[in-house]
Amino acid sequence: MNWGVRGVFIIIFVETVQMLQVYAGSFFVIPLVRWFFISKTNAEIEKRNRARKQRARALELPDPSLRRKVNMGVFILLLCFLDYYWSEYCGIGPCRVAKGELEVWREQKREKSRKNREKYQLLEYSA
């Protein structure tokens, strides 16, 4: 009977040691797997950051064609803003100036100022 109890304890001890070995192994495996995933993610982030820095450097010292494109974009944005701001006054819709209808806008403005001049001239003569 003594060996039976000892045998049960030995079996329990061996199974417990095996579970403890798996548990101890997980202390090394889980951080190792996590490190691989984090390394991959960090490599992708570094690649994006390098590309972003390269684009920033290209914008700091642009070549003449890029400078013209950026300036034209700013000009078109300004025209679009002015057109939107003046759309009530001139009677044309927003952003039509930026689409190449600058001449139409100028003609409408000239026509309106001509009518205003005529109106004020009539008022001066009638007074």
Image (cartoon, helix red, strand yellow):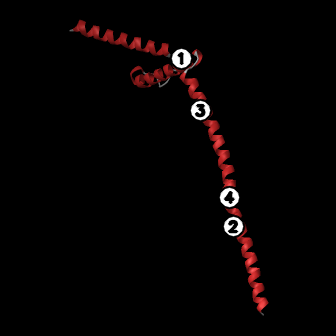
Residue ID at (73%, 78%): 13
Q: Are marks 1 and 2 in contact (CB under 8 Å)?
A: no
The residue beneath circle 1 is 100
Residue ID at (40%, 11%): 110
The residue beneath circle 2 is 23
Decide if residue 61 is on the left or right side of residue 106. right
Label 3 secondary element: helix
Label 2 secondary element: helix
Q: Marks 2 and 3, Cα distance to the nearest angstrom?
A: 43 Å
Residue 96 visible in the shown view: no
Label 1 secondary element: loop
Q: Earlier in the sequence, mark 4 or mark 1?
A: 4
Q: Marks 3 and 1, Cα distance to the nearest angstrom?
A: 33 Å
Q: Which numbered disc covers residue 30?
A: 4
Label 3 amino acid?
A: Arg
* Crowd tier of the residue under label 3, counting other residues whose Cα lies within 10 Å: few below 14, some 14–19, many 20 or above: few
Q: Are marks 3 and 1 in contact (CB under 8 Å)?
A: no
Q: Residue 57 appears at what percent x and percent y? A: 57, 26
Viewer-nearest of discs 1 and 2: 2
The residue lying toward the viewer, choosing from 119 and 47, is 47
Q: Residue furthest bottom?
A: 1
The residue beneath circle 3 is 52
Residue 32, compared with residue 71, is above or below; it is below
Label 4 amino acid?
A: Ile
* Crowd tier of the residue under label 2, counting other residues whose Cα lies within 10 Å: few below 14, some 14–19, many 20 or above: few
Q: Marks 1 and 2, Cα distance to the nearest angstrom?
A: 72 Å
Q: Residue furthest top?
A: 125
Residue ID at (37%, 10%): 114
Residue 44 visible in the shown view: yes
Q: Marks 3 and 4, Cα distance to the nearest angstrom?
A: 33 Å
Q: Earlier in the sequence, mark 4 or mark 2?
A: 2
